[in-house]
Image (cartoon, rainbow, N blue to C red):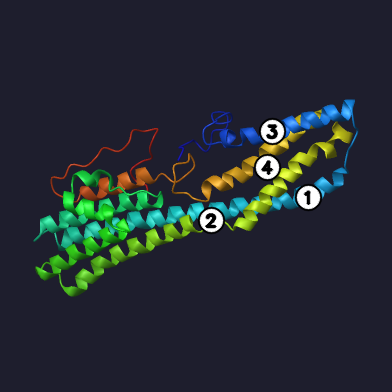
C-alpha cells in the first residue's frame, strides 16, 4: 500500500506508481493509434461516421457498469481490511489473556502460545498469496514443528490446533480452569473465522460473465468512438479518444487491482506491516523477548495500525 497525504494534489498529480498508468498504457495507446488510423482513412480514403447519440446512450450505461464494478471491488477491499483488523484485535486478546492467566505459573507455555500466534498471522498472510511461510517465527520455533506446519494441508489450521493444544496443556497443569481455557481458545476460533472470510474473498472473484461483458463493451465502445466523434471534432477526436480510453480503462483496472486486496499490488492491503505490528505487540508480552524493528518510515505505517 502507498502512503500519501490526502490533502496534497500537486505532489501526486503526476505519480506513476499505483496510478494504473503502467497497467493500461498499452490499451490506451492502441485505442489512440486506432483513432489516428480512422482519421487517416476518413481524410484520404473512405468517409464513414456513425451517429454520436448512440455512443451517448451507451456511454451512460457503460459508466454505470464501471461504477458498479469499482464499488463491488472496494467492498471486497474494505471487507478484507476489517477482517485483518479483527485478526489484530484477536491476537492481542489471546496474548493478553495468556499473559495474565498462564504466564505467572507457566511462562514457557505462554511464550509458545504467543510465538505460534505470531506464526499464525504470517502463515495466514502467505496462504492468501498461495505460499507457505511462517515468517520470522521459522527461526524461533522448534524446527520439527515448523516443518510439520509447513507440510500441513492448511497451515493456519495446523497452527491454530497447536495453539489450542498449548491452552489445553495449561489447563491440565492447573494454570487455568475449563471455563478460562474455553474463553482463551475462543480467540483462536475467531482467528480461523477471520482467515476463512479472507479466503472467501480470494476464492470468489466477480462473476466471469460480468467481467467479460464489461470488457467487451469497453473495447467496442472505445474502438467505435472515433467514428462517432469525427463529424463534430475532426482530428481533435484523437485526444478526445485518448482521454476517454484513459478514464474508462483506468476505472476498470482499479477494480481489478483492489478486488483481491491480499496480494503484492501497490494498492493492496499492507499485510506485511500489519503482521509486523502483531509480532511486536505480542512478543512484547514475553519477558526478555527480542522483537524485530518495524520497517522504516516511507515503507510502512505507524505501529498503531488495527
Mark-to-mark CA distance, 3 and 4: 14 Å
The quarter in which the N terminus is drawn is top left
- The mark nearer the N terminus, 4 or 2, is 2
Mark-to-mark CA distance, 2 and 3: 28 Å
**Which residue is at a point 89% across and 36% down the rendered structure image?**
48
Mark-to-mark CA distance, 2 and 1: 26 Å
Is 98 on the left-hand or right-hand side of 83? left
Q: Evaluate if marks 2 and 1 touch, with contact meaning CB atoms under 8 Å apart.
A: no
* Residue carrying label 4: 248
Crowding at dot 1, Cα within 10 Å, few <14 / some 14-19 / many 20+, comes out as few
Q: Evaluate if marks 3 and 1 touch, with contact meaning CB atoms under 8 Å apart.
A: no
- For label 1, the SS is helix
- The mark nearer the N terminus, 2 or 3, is 3
* Residue carrying label 2: 205
Q: Evaluate if marks 4 and 2 touch, with contact meaning CB atoms under 8 Å apart.
A: no
- For label 2, the SS is loop
Q: Evaluate if marks 4 and 1 touch, with contact meaning CB atoms under 8 Å apart.
A: no
Q: Position of residue 304 (x, y in %)?
A: 34, 46
* Residue carrying label 3: 30
* Residue carrying label 1: 58
Mark 4 vs mark 2: in front: 2
Amino acid at each position: 500500500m502507498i502512503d500519501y497525504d490526502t490533502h496534497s494534489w500537486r505532489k501526486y498529480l503526476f505519480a506513476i506508481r499505483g496510478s494504473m498508468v503502467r497497467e493500461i498504457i498499452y490499451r490506451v495507446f492502441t485505442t489512440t493509434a486506432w483513432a489516428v488510423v480512422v482519421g487517416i482513412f476518413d481524410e484520404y480514403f473512405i468517409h464513414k461516421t456513425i451517429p454520436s447519440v448512440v455512443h451517448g446512450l451507451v456511454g451512460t450505461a457503460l459508466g454505470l457498469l464501471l461504477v458498479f464494478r469499482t464499488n463491488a471491488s472496494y467492498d471486497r477491499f474494505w471487507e478484507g481490511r476489517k477482517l485483518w483488523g479483527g485478526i489484530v484485535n484477536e491476537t492481542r486478546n489471546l496474548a493478553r489473556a495468556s499473559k495474565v492467566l498462564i504466564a505467572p505459573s507457566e511462562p514457557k507455555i505462554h511464550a509458545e502460545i504467543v510465538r505460534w500466534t505470531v506464526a499464525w498471522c504470517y502463515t495466514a498472510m502467505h496462504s492468501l498469496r498461495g505460499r507457505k511461510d511462517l515468517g520470522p517465527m521459522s527461526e524461533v520455533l522448534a524446527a520439527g514443528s515448523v516443518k510439520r506446519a509447513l507440510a500441513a494441508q492448511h497451515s493456519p489450521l495446523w497452527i491454530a490446533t497447536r495453539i489450542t493444544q498449548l491452552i489445553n496443556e495449561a489447563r491440565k497443569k492447573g494454570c487455568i480452569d475449563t471455563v478460562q481455557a474455553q474463553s482463551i481458545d475462543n480467540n483462536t476460533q475467531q482467528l480461523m473465522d477471520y482467515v476463512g472470510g479472507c479466503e472467501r474473498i480470494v476464492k470468489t472473484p466477480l462473476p466471469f460473465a460480468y467481467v467479460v461483458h464489461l470488457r467487451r463493451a469497453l473495447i467496442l465502445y472505445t474502438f467505435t468512438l472515433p467514428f462517432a466523434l469525427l463529424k463534430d471534432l475532426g482530428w481533435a477526436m484523437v485526444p478526445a479518444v485518448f482521454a476517454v480510453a484513459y478514464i474508462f480503462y483506468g476505472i476498470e483496472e482499479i477494480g481489478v487491482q483492489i478486488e483481491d486486496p491480499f496480494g503484492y499490488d501497490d494498492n493492496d492491503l499492507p499485510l506485511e506491516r500489519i503482521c509486523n505490528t502483531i509480532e511486536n505487540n505480542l512478543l512484547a508480552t514475553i519477558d526478555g523477548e527480542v522483537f524485530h524493528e518495524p520497517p522504516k518510515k516511507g515503507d510502512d505505517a505507524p505501529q498503531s495500525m488495527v
